[in-house]
Amino acid sequence: YPHGLQMDKIPLGSRIIGVVDAIDAMTSARPYREPMSWKDCMREILLNKGVQFDPVVVETAEKLWKRWEGRRQEEEAVSSKVKLKVVR
């Protein structure tokens, strides 16, 4: 981190962004790979708790996980029903 910041010296917002950005990256489709399942993503986040990710932020994410997963599934269901009309 810039200026050698570690642990709680890193601003809380930055620590939160680090976790949610990783979740988004792992669970989103990329041109070079399929998205990771929510279950596998959660396992990866927990595996790196205190190593790559702030433990307090990960514990809070754990509490919100089912809600996020449900919202993601709802969004995917809605987007799969939306038909785009091609305009020529």
Image: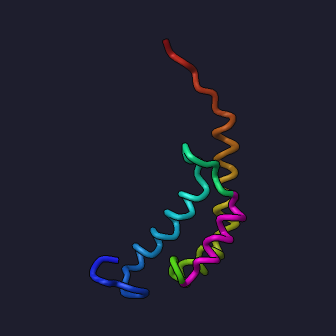
| Residue depicted at 72% across the width and 64% down the height | 39
Name the spot of residue 80 as percent of width and height, x first.
68, 37
Q: In the drawing, does residue 69 fall left or right of residue 11?
A: right
Name the spot of residue 58 as percent of width and height, x first.
58, 78
Q: Residue furthest front?
A: 32
Q: Quadrant of residue 50?
A: bottom right
Q: Nearer the viewer, residue 54 or 1?
A: 1
Q: In the displayed structure, would residue 81 be above or below residue 64?
A: above
Q: Nearer the viewer, residue 62 or 43?
A: 43
Q: Quadrant of the N terminus?
A: bottom left
Tell me which secondary structure the magenta stretch mostly adopts.
helix
| Residue depicted at 63% across the width and 52% down the height | 35
Q: Residue furthest left?
A: 3
Q: Nearer the viewer, residue 19 or 32?
A: 32
| Residue depicted at 70% across the width and 43% down the height | 77
Q: Is residue 55 magenta?
A: no
Q: Is residue 48 magenta?
A: yes
Q: In the drawing, does residue 11 fall left or right of residue 35?
A: left
Q: In the displayed structure, would residue 8 be above or below residue 70?
A: below
Q: In the drawing, does residue 28 fall left or right of residue 13?
A: right
Figure coloring: rainbow
Q: In the displayed structure, would residue 81 be above or below residue 45?
A: above
Q: Residue furthest top?
A: 88
Q: Nearer the viewer, residue 48 or 86?
A: 48
Q: Which residues are magenta?
A: 37-50
Name the spot of residue 37 as percent of width and height, x first.
70, 58
Name the spot of residue 14 as percent of width and height, x first.
40, 73
Q: How many marks?
A: 0
| Residue depicted at 34% across the width and 84% down the height | 5
